[in-house]
């Protein structure tokens, strides 16, 4: 009998992340109960933050294929005093919810350092930690607490899943295994029809994902100003100042789009832009949006300290507006063979393969071996 999963991770219904993609596929063999990590997240302090530039009128959130609990479901509301609820009490409520859902011998899968307090209430459950990509930006105090909570989980976890080889080697533990990010190959590489609001006059370059403090909006504006015949799109939630882009006639700030509709844009762009602010911390693994662009066959122009994994040779650097504009002009009419090459290179990075690897690693916790795991403590 396989063991089921209690997952504690950030819930981003607009853009399914690593953990969501894995759990959607592990559902074939295991029940999953998801707790939104916002139930445990400490409020951001007074550090710098980006203010929303435009109101969001995006699509409705995508319903998860598994039950999702929020803070209110564990008796932890929005009031600051509510976060003083005992982690043990929260764990008991979470266990009770898992029992109601019929979970069998659940494994605690943590994908957020803010889940560390729950360890006090799950002394005997096997713990998997899916290492987070990067700490929260902009608030040194919050980043320090994030690191402390992560260290606590790393010390307790029975299985650690690292998103890149360098991080796996730095952890130097027999409990650590490599589980790189994947991509929905079928979604992004299967030919589709163009979106209705796709620009039709001139070549198109775009960015998709979330736009926060790490996004170099100034560079994006400078590139668009240099290439008036090009059209530029931003797809995703906005949480930083974008007012400098609103006056550019060749920039379309589209906001959120359903994840399954993104190929209707990406497959018809001439290039994707991955523009990270020079002071942004380099993430531990390639961004999902980067892999999605490659799966769609797109050339990617990169600025800042992005993590490109084994795909750096498929990108062009554009750390200033002049260089980036020249790179876009160079790829505007590239041969179709280059698109096929990018798709071929990411062909082994699918989420189905990642889920199969995760299932093999989880097998040690399944019936007959759980006692051995608990006995190690």
Image (cartoon, rainbow, N blue to C red):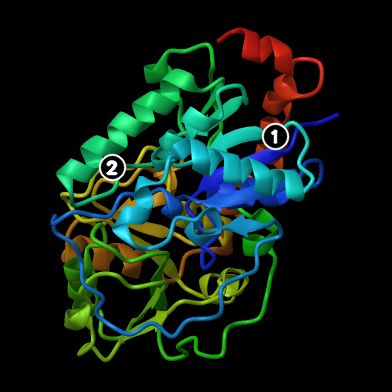
> Cβ–Cβ below 8 Å for labels 1 and 2?
no
The percent coordinates of residue 312 (x first, y second) are: 39, 42
Give the distance between the C-alpha atoms of the residues marked 1 and 2, in whole angstroms. 34 Å
The percent coordinates of residue 44 (x first, y second) are: 24, 55
In the image, 371 versus 170, the foreground residue is 371
In the image, 145 versus 311, the foreground residue is 145
Extreme residue toward the right, this view? 1
Q: Is residue 272 left or right of residue 305?
A: right
Give the quadrant of the N terminus: top right
Does residue 162 appear anywhere in the picture? no
Query: Secondary structure under badge 2?
Result: loop
Residue at 53 percent of width and 53 percent of height: 74
- Report crowding for label 2: few under 14, some 14 to 19, many 20 or more residues within 10 A (C-alpha): some
In this rendering, the answer to whether 181 lies above or below 58 is above
Residue at 45 percent of width and 71 percent of height: 270
Quadrant of the rendered image containing residue 56:
bottom left
Numbered label attached to residue 106 = 1
Query: Secondary structure under badge 1?
Result: loop
Residue at 18 percent of width and 49 percent of height: 139
Q: Is residue 57 left or right of residue 250?
A: right
Which numbered disc, 1 or 2, marks the residue that appears first in the sequence?
1
Q: Which residue is mark 2?
A: 282
In this rendering, the answer to whether 188 lies above or below 192 is above
Q: Nearer the viewer, mark 1 or mark 2?
A: 1
Q: Is residue 237 left or right of residue 80?
A: right
Q: Is residue 194 left or right of residue 254?
A: right
Query: Exactly how many numbered labels are in the figure?
Result: 2
Quadrant of the rendered image containing residue 238:
bottom left
The percent coordinates of residue 243 (x first, y second) are: 19, 82
């Amino acid at each position: 009998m396989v063991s089921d999963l209690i997952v504690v991770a950030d819930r981003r219904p607009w853009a399914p992340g690593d953990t969501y993609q894995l759990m959607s596929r592990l559902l074939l063999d295991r029940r999953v109960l998801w707790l939104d990590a916002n139930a445990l997240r400490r409020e951001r302090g007074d550090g710098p933050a980006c203010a929303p530039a435009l109101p969001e009128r995006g699509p409705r959130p995508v319903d998860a294929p598994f039950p999702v609990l929020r803070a209110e479901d564990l008796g932890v509301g929005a009031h600051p005093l509510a976060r003083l609820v005992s982690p043990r009490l929260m764990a008991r409520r979470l266990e009770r919810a898992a029992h109601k859902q019929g979970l069998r011998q659940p494994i605690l899968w943590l994908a957020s350092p803010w889940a560390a307090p729950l360890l006090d209430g799950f002394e005997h459950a096997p713990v998997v930690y899916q290492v987070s990509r990067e700490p929260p930006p902009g608030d040194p105090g919050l980043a320090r607490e994030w690191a402390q909570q992560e260290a606590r989980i790393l010390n307790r976890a029975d299985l650690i899943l690292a998103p890149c080889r360098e991080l796996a080697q730095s952890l130097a533990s027999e409990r650590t295994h490599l589980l790189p990010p994947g991509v929905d190959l079928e979604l992004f590489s299967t030919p589709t029809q163009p979106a209705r609001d796709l620009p039709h006059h001139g070549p198109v370059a775009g960015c998709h994902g979330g736009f926060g403090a790490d996004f170099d909006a100034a560079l994006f504006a400078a590139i668009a100003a240099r290439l008036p015949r090009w059209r530029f799109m931003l797809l995703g939630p906005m949480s930083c100042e974008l007012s400098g882009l609103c006056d550019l006639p060749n920039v379309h700030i589209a906001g959120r789009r359903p994840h399954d509709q993104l190929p209707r844009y990406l497959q018809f762009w001439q290039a994707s832009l991955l523009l990270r602010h020079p002071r942004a911390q380099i993430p531990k693994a390639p961004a999902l949006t980067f892999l999605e662009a490659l799966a769609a066959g797109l050339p990617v122009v990169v600025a800042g300290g992005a993590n490109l994994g084994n795909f750096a040779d498929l990108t062009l650097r554009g750390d200033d507006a002049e260089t980036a504009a020249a790179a876009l002009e160079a790829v505007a009419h590239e041969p179709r063979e280059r698109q096929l090459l990018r798709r071929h290179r990411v062909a082994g990075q699918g989420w189905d393969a990642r889920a199969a690897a995760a299932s093999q690693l989880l097998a040690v916790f399944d019936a007959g071996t759980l006692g051995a795991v608990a006995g190690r403590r």
